[in-house]
Image (cartoon, rainbow, N blue to C red):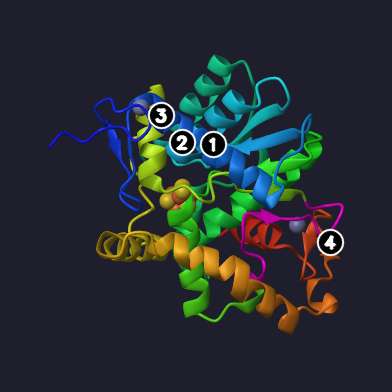
Amino acid sequence: MMKRCRTCQQPAAIILPASGGKFCAEHFLDFFRNKVKRTNLKYKLINPHERIGVALSGGKDSAVLMHVLDDLYVETLDLIGIHVNLGIHTTSYSARSHQLSKALCDKLGREFICIDLKKEFQMSMDLVKERENQIARSLCGTCGTIKRYLLNRYALALDCEKLATGHVLDDEVSVLFMNMFSGKINQLIRMGPCLPTMSEHMISRIKPLYELSESETTSYAQLVGLETQDEECPYAKGATTLKYKKLFSEFEKRTPGVRYGFIHNYINRILPALTAYYHRPEDLALKTCEECHGPTTESLCAFCTLRTVLTKED
Ligand code: Q46
Ligand code: ZN
Ligand code: ZN
């Protein structure tokens, strides 16, 4: 029997795996936009007339984030795309990511800024790969540190009130599980759709796609015709989060809705209990990095520590 859109009864183009909801293209886009709006209202992520930095990687999720925020808040939000060129030149990955991020902002008429890791800091992910054995972290863990640091620093310098990232349900679930698995209480306390600022050197971070899945962002990107990165990052292989993502997508196939339930229960039940039990202001008190004056828990921040390793002569 032909599947029909639940709103207009036209033939369905999209069937949501978790809820079984069926939509034609037009009503799927309505569903998607409404979900972003509801997430923003529920978690108070965005206020009218804010200037918001949108972290753009060139990939699908961040492009969808920029597109949907532009569409929903065309008159009321000042959006600026911020892209970090990670210096991955063993393939065309970084060049293409940069080009796609810029093209999207140009098309939407939004401001765009690129932070070039190599030109501005004499660092690159290719160099991290070369010196992998001197850095006691995974490639993706190191890359995450670099991106968090630079996005925070530049979004503040660009007078943004908030930084929006394209994390989706699949990312949140895998990171949440990974942090639980390795007992990282400090990271667990700081999870959720918004991470308020804790110092004047730290921007508030928000995740407007928090309750949408990767398959939903894929459908959105296809329906609105977004061109996004199709090349895989050469350093992604073996990343732990990818393993957990795969595990949970298998789980989701057998038990539709399990990922949303996991996140929902964590945010509403476990996180408040964990915060009440573990929250000690002295644990969250931040120092100032001796090198860059950014926020840190040690005398040097993680970025400056890494930079010392990467820029020292052999
Ligand atoms: S760019 Fe960086 Fe990703 Fe490449 S090294 Fe890993 S984290 S996979 S989004
Ligand atoms: Zn319809
Ligand atoms: Zn520093």
Disc 3 beta carbon < 8 A from ligand 2? yes
Which residue corresponds to mark 2?
Answer: 31
Q: Indicate the position of residue 245 as horizontal and vertical percent values.
A: 37, 60
User: What residue sits 67% from the left and 29% below the top?
Assistant: 80
The part of the chain drawn in magenta is 187-202
Residues at marks 1 and 2 touching, judged by CB atoms closer than 8 Å:
yes
- Disc 4 residue type (three-letter): Glu
Residue 201 painted magenta: yes
Which quarter of the rendering shows the C terminus? Answer: bottom right
| Mark sitting earlier along the chain (3/1) | 3
Estimate how packed mark 1 is, as few (under 14), some (14 to 19) or many (20 or more) residues with alpha carbons within 10 Å: few
- How far apart marks 3 and 4 lie (CA) works out to 53 Å
Q: In this image, 260 relative to 80: left or right?
A: left
Disc 2 beta carbon < 8 A from ligand 2? no
Q: Nearer the viewer, mark 4 or mark 1?
A: 1
Residues at marks 3 and 2 touching, judged by CB atoms closer than 8 Å:
yes
